[in-house]
Image (cartoon, grey):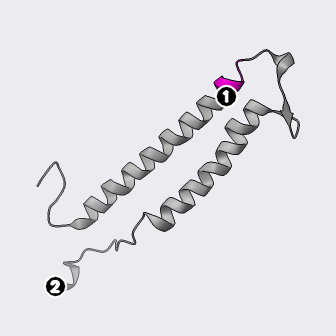
Amino acid sequence: MKNGISDKDPRFKIAQREAWIGVILVIINFVWWFGFAYGMGSESVESYTYIFGLPAWFFFSCVGGFVLMVILVILAVKLLFKEVPFDDETEGTR
């Protein structure tokens, strides 16, 4: 065992890598949301611009952020994640 991960089963290494990808996606989502919500939303209400009836800061942070994250998650799953069998490899040898 190295760093708490089994050396014999490569699925643990793949799972750890994919978990880190998930953490990175969460950080991107938070930075995007925080940047637009507090960057544009800290102005006075009278100076807000509106998109589809929503304040621009809300539209970009919540609606735009949602669309961005959906695209990033789809790309991550299609390009970075690997198909891993869940059944035990030693199951058939018993």
Identify the residue position indicated by label 1 in the image.
Answer: 37
SS for dot 1:
helix
Mark 1: which amino acid?
Ala
Q: Residue furthest bottom?
A: 93
Q: Position of residue 63 (x, y in %)?
A: 72, 43
- Dot 2 or dot 1: first in sequence order is 1
Write the start and end of the magenta stretch as one range: 37-42
Mark 2, other Cα within 10 Å: few <14 / some 14–19 / many ≥20: few
Residue 37 in picture, x, y percent from top left: 67, 28
Q: Residue furthest top?
A: 44
Residue 35 image-quadrant placement = top right
Query: Position of 41 compared to 52: left or right?
Result: left
The residue where tag 2 is placed is: 93
How far from the left and from the top, in percent, is residue 25?
Answer: 49, 47
Q: Residue drawn 71% across and 25% down?
A: 40
Which amino acid lies under the numbered mark 2 shown in the image of this protein?
Thr
| Residue occupying image coordinates x 49% and y 43% | 26
Quarter assignment of residue 46: top right
Q: CA distance from mark 2 to mark 1?
A: 56 Å
Label 2 SS: helix
* Residue at 47% over, 66% down: 79
